[in-house]
Image (cartoon, helix red, strand yellow):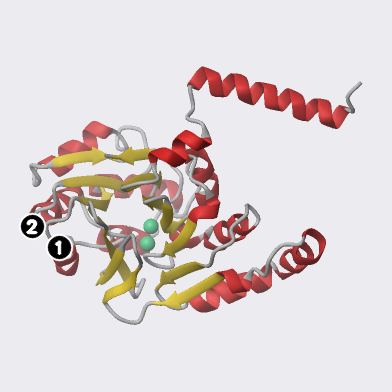
Amino acid sequence: MLAPRIRNVVSRLATAVVIALAMQLPTETALAQATSTGTHLILLGTGGGPSFKKARAQPANALIVNGSVYIIDAGNGVARQMELAGIPAQELRAIFITHNHSDHVADYGTLLLRAWLSGLKKPVETFGPPPLVSMTRTYEQYMDWDIQLRIVDEGRPQFATLVHPHDIANEGIIYQDKNVRVSVAEVTHGGAKPAYAYRFDTADRSIVFSGDTSKNAKLVKLAADADVLVHEVLNPEAVDLMVATIDPGNATLKRHMLESHTAMEDVGRVATEANVKKLVLTHFVPTGVATFDLPEVWLKGVRKTYAGDIVVGEDLMEIK
Ligand SMILES: [Zn+2]
Ligand SMILES: [Zn+2]
């Protein structure tokens, strides 16, 4: 007779098999084959802002280029979203942070730690505005008890030697490997300075991430003629309701929302001025508020100023 713990595992495995069959999930091999060549963009988290939200996960995106994984922003839940998308932690090559607001960086350390504990063997390069390097070292100290124990107790490799953090000092090209060339431009995001937008050029696609920004000429230049622009979006009409819900009467919060983000019509203008082929909306402000966070509302707001392809982003959506 099986021990209760084993029986539990067997029963969970059986359930997983039944669910996998019912949903016709791709096997790991099939998924690895599907992303082993070319460029694949997957939205991991499309929510905007630091407060509790059940409608969408916090900001994170994955680019898989010839099987190598590049993560753009690492909001709370990024590792879990990668698991749900079937993205292998072992293939993580680099992380790019747009700015250090917590909704973009909350699970930066957790992602690295969980990747390390999931069989990561190759170094990961990480980039972001200062103080990313010191944040990385501080996280290593915060988790030092766990890290040192697992090295001794489980034979894990050194964690610190696998993680190579970089503070971005200048605009222009910041990273290049056989799959991708990455350039940045500084954008305007209220008091969050510096904040960066990223452009990824691969053999078959060019993809730009606005990060959080107000309408910005440097972003238009960075995104010129790109295949895809992944842009944050704000519905200004929702701001009063949001402030009343989160912190009634907080005029500073209201000003931050209105001045540090890009309203729907301006998002369309940026896409038009940059002549991008496809506009993907993400980082929805508000997220999950009935009557506002609806595809038709976002589309209507942005369509007024952009005639190209518009995608209203959702968590775990692959952008073709
Ligand atoms: Zn944000
Ligand atoms: Zn922000």
Q: Amino acid at mark 2?
A: Glu
Locate the N terminus and report the quarter of the image it occupies. Answer: top right
The residue nearer to you, when weighing 252 against 256, is 256
Q: Are marks 1 and 2 in contact (CB under 8 Å)?
A: yes
- Mark pair 1, 2: CA separation: 6 Å
> What residue is at 31 percent from the left and 62 percent from the top?
180
Q: Which mark is residue 101?
A: none
- Ligand 1 visible in quadrant: bottom left
The residue nearer to you, when weighing 123 against 45, is 123
**Mark 2 C-beta to ligand 2 under 8 Å:** no
| Residue 159 screen position, x and y as percent | 64, 68
- Count the marks: 2
> What residue is at 47 percent from the left and 78 percent from the top?
131
Q: Is residue 222 left or right of residue 314?
A: left
| Residue 202 screen position, x and y as percent | 26, 57
Q: Is residue 279 left or right of residue 163?
A: left
Can you identify the residue that label 2 sits on? 273
Q: Residue furthest bottom?
A: 169
| Residue 58 screen position, x and y as percent | 45, 50
Q: Amino acid at mark 1?
A: Val
> What residue is at 59 percent from the left and 61 percent from the top?
121
Can you identify the residue that label 1 sits on? 220
In this orientation, does residue 76 appear? no
Q: Residues within 10 Å of mark 2 (few under 14, many from 20)?
A: some
Image quarter of residue 177: bottom left
Locate the C terminus and report the quarter of the image it occupies. Answer: top left
Q: Earlier in the sequence, mark 1 or mark 2?
A: 1
**Mark 1 C-beta to ligand 2 under 8 Å:** no
| Label 2 residue SS | helix
- When the figure is inspected, residue 193 is found, relative to residue 182, above or below; the finding is below
Image quarter of residue 187: bottom left
| Label 1 residue SS | helix
